[in-house]
């Protein structure tokens, strides 16, 4: 990877880490499903404009759009809702740490549901470390003085599991011959269609007090920076450095989210949360495999 690639990877981690910060700010005045709706609604318009400017056609075909609805459900609507609802109980930094367990769940789901992505010893070690981190985080969530964090931790773990399921479900799009930007637009557009009636039915946003300027700025950052722009950067990195190198962003997102949460929102991480983060990070390093391979070569 070139220095410019590392720069884009760092920017992507900042944008996705910023999503936890932006959503935490917005949730101070708006309910979770409304935040989900605004995020995906604005991002849908931005991605549609991106397709038009690049001359990329909007995807067509009923079978393809049925698949988009499934992907939107697993990869956007349910996890976004769970994370935002969870963040009403826990801080943005802790939510990002839990979200970093996504590769652990993705590997377990792939092992159970596919024939060509079975667990190796390296992956097993990574999964074990990641799950140990989850146990430590759960222990911290039920410890005295945790402030009732358990519902938020469980919700964010449910979101990570959804992302793991979406990783396996999304394999079908490789066979459909669509560009990544088309897939992103289809996923976010169908999420908007599903989120609209839910937000109207559950949140009744017309009864919510008008949000302030800070909330509107957070919503704009969440939709335009942490969703639309982040997807564009993600697709560019996939095309230039490959999926494996791009997956390194998983390790970097909690860093930027924690820095934003601690530095601006004045959040604090407990000792159990730090310990869980270290174990999850070690698990991600093991799952990536490159460090272990280099150690073996050196030995």
Image: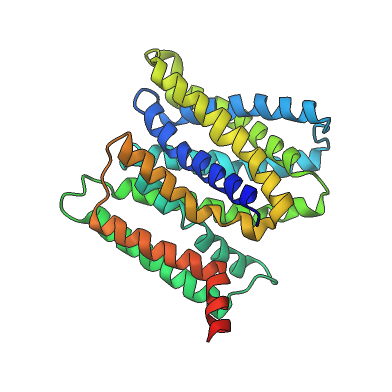
Q: Which residue is located at x 51 percent, y 28 percent?
A: 221
- Residue nearest the observer in this picture, 14 or 104: 14
Task: Examine the rendered structure and indicate whether residue 125 appears above or below residue 32.
Answer: below
Query: Residue 234, position in %: x, y?
Result: 64, 45
Task: Examine the rendered structure and indicate whether residue 299 appears above or below residue 42.
Answer: below
Q: Which residue is located at x 46 percent, y 21 percent?
A: 217
Query: Residue 243, position in %: x, y?
Result: 67, 57
Count of marks overlaid on the render: 0
Q: Residue furthest front?
A: 3
Position of 90 compared to 256: left or right?
Answer: left
Task: Examine the rendered structure and indicate whether residue 4 appears above or below residue 34.
Answer: below
- Residue nearest the observer in this picture, 205 or 97: 97
Position of 2 compared to 145: left or right?
Answer: right
Position of 185 compared to 37: left or right?
Answer: right
Chosen colour scheme = rainbow
Q: Is residue 289 visible?
A: no
- Residue nearest the observer in this picture, 195 or 265: 265
Residue 28 position by quadrant = top left
On-image quarter of the N terminus: bottom right
Query: Residue 43, position in %: x, y?
Result: 61, 29
Residue 235 position by quadrant = top right
Q: Which residue is located at x 82 percent, y 49 percent?
A: 176
Query: Residue 258, position in %: x, y?
Result: 37, 45
Q: Which residue is located at x 26 percent, y 60 percent?
A: 139
Q: Is residue 295 visible?
A: yes
Position of 45 compared to 277: left or right?
Answer: right
Q: Residue furthest bottom?
A: 299
């Amino acid at each position: 990877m070139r220095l410019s690639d590392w720069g884009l990877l760092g920017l992507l981690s900042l944008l996705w880490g910023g999503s936890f910060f932006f959503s935490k700010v917005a949730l101070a005045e708006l309910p979770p499903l409304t935040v989900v709706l605004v995020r995906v609604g604005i991002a849908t318009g931005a991605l549609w404009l991106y397709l038009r400017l690049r001359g990329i056609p909007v995807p067509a075909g009923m079978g393809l759009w049925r698949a988009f609805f499934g992907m939107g459900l697993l990869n956007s609507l349910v996890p976004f809702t769970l994370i935002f609802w969870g963040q009403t109980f826990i801080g943005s930094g802790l939510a990002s740490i839990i979200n970093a367990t996504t590769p652990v769940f993705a590997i377990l789901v792939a092992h159970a549901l596919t024939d060509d992505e079975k667990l190796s010893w390296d992956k097993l070690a990574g999964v074990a470390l990641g799950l140990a981190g989850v146990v430590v985080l759960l222990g911290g969530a039920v410890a005295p003085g945790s402030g009732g964090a358990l519902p938020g931790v469980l919700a964010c773990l449910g979101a990570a599991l959804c992302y793991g399921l979406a990783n396996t479900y999304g394999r079908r799009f490789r066979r459909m011959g669509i560009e990544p930007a088309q897939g992103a637009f289809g996923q976010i557009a169908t999420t908007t269609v599903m989120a609209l009636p839910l937000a109207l039915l559950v949140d009744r946003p017309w009864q919510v007090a008008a949000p302030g300027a800070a909330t509107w700025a957070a919503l704009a950052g969440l939709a335009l920076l942490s969703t639309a722009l982040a997807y564009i950067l993600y697709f560019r990195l996939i095309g230039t450095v490959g999926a494996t190198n791009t997956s390194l962003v998983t390790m970097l997102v909690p860093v930027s989210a924690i820095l934003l949460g601690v530095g601006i929102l004045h959040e604090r991480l407990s000792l159990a949360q730090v310990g869980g983060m270290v174990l999850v990070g070690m698990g991600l390093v093991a799952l990536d495999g490159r460090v272990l391979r280099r150690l073996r070569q050196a030995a």
